[in-house]
């Protein structure tokens, strides 16, 4: 015979640790955390941003999205490839709506690699190139691919930028690698082993 207790069931109280320290971090520290998280793939970065952004101003979120390292943000880790690709595509869609420079550059490069609407996407890269070294490099490379007669002019412009701008020079290797990856893996975000 089962005995029924006369005391009512009590719910166990959940203890939720405060996210206050995370939410009050300086944006420069959050950007550095994101750079570290990017080394392990997109999902870690995405989940961190999901927790962080809910308690931030739209300006802080915009600053973060514009300062992500878009040269690696699209790389995914093999074990979670399908999930990570779906999450990345949604994240990219949001960033494109927010007009995030890195997302616009990535998307334009992807479309140019596929030959989709080249004049439109070249114009996007051209517009971005004044403030973004990757977009500057991408614009002149893709312009040469689509308009071979501009080879000499674009080579001269890139050479001049390389000589005169230390930041462009220091970003060149990483940006070339990024463009190479976008040219090789045009159907979806790239995979890292």
Image (cartoon, helix red, strand yellow):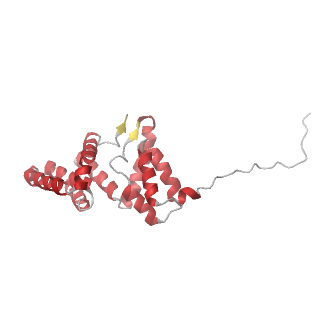
- Quarter of the image with the C terminus is top left
Q: Quadrant of residue 23?
A: bottom right
Residue 80 placement (x, y as % from top left): 45, 38
Residue at 89%, 41% (x, y): give it.
4
Q: Is residue 79 above or below residue 91?
A: above
In the rendered structure, the answer to whether residue 45 lies left or right of residue 14 reads left
Q: How many marks?
A: 0
Tell me if I can see residue 12 in this picture. yes
| Front position in the image: 85 or 73 | 73
| Front position in the image: 154 or 39 | 39
Residue at 77%, 50% (x, y): give it.
11
Residue 29 placement (x, y as % from top left): 46, 56
Residue at 13%, 56% (x, y): give it.
160
Tell me if I can see residue 117 in this picture. no
Residue 134 placement (x, y as % from top left): 26, 53
Q: Is residue 163 above or below residue 114?
A: below
Residue at 22%, 48% (x, y): give it.
115
| Front position in the image: 33 or 104 | 33
In the rendered structure, the answer to whether residue 56 lies left or right of residue 109 reads right
Q: Is residue 99 above or below residue 151?
A: below
Residue 100 placement (x, y as % from top left): 35, 59
- Quarter of the image with the N terminus is top right
């Amino acid at each position: 015979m089962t005995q029924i207790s006369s005391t009512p069931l009590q719910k166990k109280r959940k203890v939720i640790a405060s996210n206050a320290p995370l939410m009050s971090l300086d944006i420069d520290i959050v950007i550095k955390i994101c750079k570290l998280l990017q080394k392990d793939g997109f999902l870690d970065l995405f989940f961190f941003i999901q927790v962080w952004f809910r308690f931030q101003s739209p300006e802080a979120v915009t600053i973060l999205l514009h300062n992500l390292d878009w040269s690696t943000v699209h790389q995914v880790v093999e074990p979670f490839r399908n999930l990570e690709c779906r999450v990345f595509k949604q994240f990219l869609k949001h960033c494109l709506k927010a007009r995030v420079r890195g997302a616009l550059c990535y998307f334009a490069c992807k479309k140019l690699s596929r030959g989709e609407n080249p004049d439109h996407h070249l114009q996007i890269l051209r517009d971005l190139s004044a403030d973004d070294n990757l977009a500057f490099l991408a614009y002149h490379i893709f312009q040469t691919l689509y308009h071979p007669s501009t080879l000499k002019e674009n080579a001269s412009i890139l050479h001049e930028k390389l000589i005169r701008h230390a930041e462009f020079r220091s970003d060149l290797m990483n940006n070339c690698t990024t463009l190479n990856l976008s040219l090789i893996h045009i159907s979806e975000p790239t995979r890292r082993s």
